[in-house]
Amino acid sequence: MAVYRAQGVWPGEAEGRIVWVDPEWQPERAGCADRPAEIGRLREAVGRALHDLDAWMDRQPTLGGRVLLQHCREALQDPAFMERVTMLIDQHGLTAPAALMEAASLVGGIMARSEELRERAAALRQTARWLARRLDGAAHPEDAILASRAFSALELLDRTRPAVMAAGEPVVVGDAPLLWGVDAVAPEWAGRPARIRGGTLILGEEDEAGGLLHEAARRAVLAVARRMKAEGLVRMKEGNVSCRIPGTSLFAVTPSGLPYESLEPADICILDLDGRVVDARRRPSTETALHRFVYRRRPDVGGVVHTHSLHATAFACTGREIPVISTELAALVGAEVPCAPYAPAGTERLAEVVAEALGDEGAAALLQNHGVVTVGETVEQAYAAAVAVEVAAQVFLLARQLGEPIVLPPEERRRIFRSMRTGYGQPREA
């Protein structure tokens, strides 16, 4: 279960399942069999749309909302636009939704060349898209909670279903419950049970967390994955994180291709060391083999972190190791960071070369032309090593601008590493 606070709301409560509304939706362009009937269908739809726009306009408390709806009304009455739509149906056999979208693109593009008409061009495109969706006739289940990165003002006013979106406050005001400013909204939410309570979205079943298998490991992986993204060691959906589940031959690993900020503990996958899925509702990371190869070779490893951090990856792209020039790298990694030879991403060959580069004691390795892998007794320790590798790479590149960096002698870096393991921080409780 995950709880998200919205920046703002149109009040109400709702319960159901998320239905993703694609902001890039396009209608089918298949030809219509009866062109006169399609033109008649279009004219009826325009008449109903003008009636609805008048009703919505009367209820808007702000001038901005009324002006926007007036622009949309004028768009539906624009002679050049409607003539183009009719021609595309009559002469080219397009369906009315496809003709609306194509005509708006053409006429709106011409309008947008004039600074004075840019607002009208935007309103034209928004209106055409809304009417095309109406004509397309997509129906939503009774318990749908609509979700999208953004809805247009007309889409928001035309709803009978509650909705949630990532975009900010709309210029219009409507009735059906709406949460806006929920940044984590993503297509992967589709089908998930959800509840709207005031300004809060609750995603997932109430008892979902309580019955989750190996919940502590999943939460530990998720926490590190989010830190990795927030602190810039990866961008978008790059990288992956795992941790061994104590007392078992299992490990928890991040799923493939999902944004970390939208993940919940239940999205983290549980596998065994042979790669078999034990419990997962998502597809595991494409680099799962890398994690399980490390765990099989290194019983001392409890966590693995794979990043694409910028400066360390620059070393990886030259095939160079990162020397130990800082006490921080010596403390957290203990030795130079070697570069494993190139192997295709997501393959067992990559897993093999990484496990070989790490050896029996290594804490970090570069992946040629790819990124960085770090390991530790815990996933938190592996993440600390990942940060240390990136900082060391950045410090080395800065130091080279001032002169030749001084590499710590092997005996000194070993001493620092041992000291970090035995004398740093607070003693462990029995």
Image (cartoon, rainbow, N blue to C red):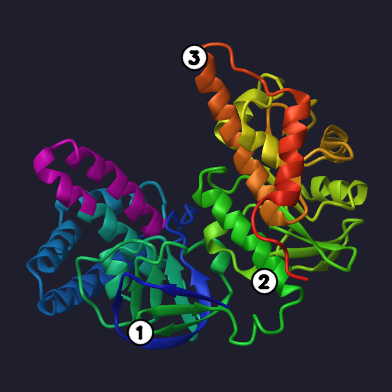
Residue located at (71% from left, 74% from top): 215
Residue 13 location (% of width, % of height): 39, 88
Residue to which mark 1 is pinned = 198
| Marks 3 and 1, how far apart at CA | 55 Å
Image check: 183 left or right of 278?
A: left
Q: Residue 368 carries which label?
A: none
The picture quadrant where one finds residue 226 is bottom right
Residue to which mark 3 is pinned = 401
Residue to which mark 2 is pinned = 266
Near mark 3 (Cα within 10 A), the count class, few <14, some 14-19 or many ≥20, is: few
Residue located at (82% from left, 40% from top): 347
Residue 371 location (% of width, % of height): 67, 34
| Marks 2 and 3, how far apart at CA | 47 Å
Q: Does the CB distance between marks 2 and 3 fall below 8 Å? A: no
Residue 360 location (% of width, % of height): 89, 40
Q: Give the range drawn in magenta.
A: 95-122
Answer whether residue 345 is visible to the viewer in this image: no
Residue 274 location (% of width, % of height): 92, 56
